[in-house]
Amino acid sequence: MALIACPKCRKRISDKAESCQHCHEVLVGDPEKIRTGARIKRIEKSARLMTYSFFALIMFIAGIAYSGMYAETGASWDKWGSQIVSGVGFIWYIVLRVQIMLFKKEKD
Ligand SMILES: [Zn+2]
């Protein structure tokens, strides 16, 4: 009897179980299929995190660049707005990187 990760809640369950004892997800079908399903979900989540972190980085860089262009004109909505955008992008990027790091540590 082997332990696999539940495709829904990702807790450890027996590959012989017909349903997850944690979230009650029904797991009928062959374990290889379930494992593949869980793997696909992982890849999709990973791709989503990577896409978000890409957008966060773009926000950060675009905000900095835009703010730099308006640096000489003094305080303006454009300048403050772009600084806020870059700040949000930066924080979002850091949060996503931490999520990606934790996600990669997670066992299959
Ligand atoms: Zn579950």
Image (cartoon, rainbow, N blue to C red):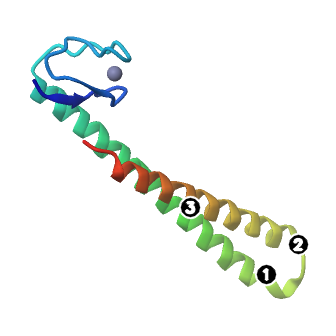
Amino acid of disc 3:
Ile
Please tell me in which quadrant of the rendered image residue 45 appears.
top left
Callout 3–callout 2 Cβ contact below 8 Å: no
Amino acid of disc 2:
Ser
**Other-residue count near label 3 (Cα within 10 Å), few / some / many at <14 / 14–19 / ≥20:** some
Residue 37 position, x and y percent, is 22, 31
Q: Please name the residue that numbered disc 1 is placed on.
A: 70
Callout 2–callout 1 Cβ contact below 8 Å: yes
Residue 96 position, x and y percent, is 51, 55
Q: Please name the residue that numbered disc 2 is placed on.
A: 76
As measured in the structure, the alpha-carbon distance from the residue carrying label 3 to the one carrying label 2 is 27 Å
Q: Secondary structure at mark 1?
A: loop
Q: Secondary structure at mark 2?
A: loop
Q: Please name the residue that numbered disc 3 is placed on.
A: 94
Location of ligand 1 given as a quarter of the image: top left
- Quadrant where the C terminus sits is top left
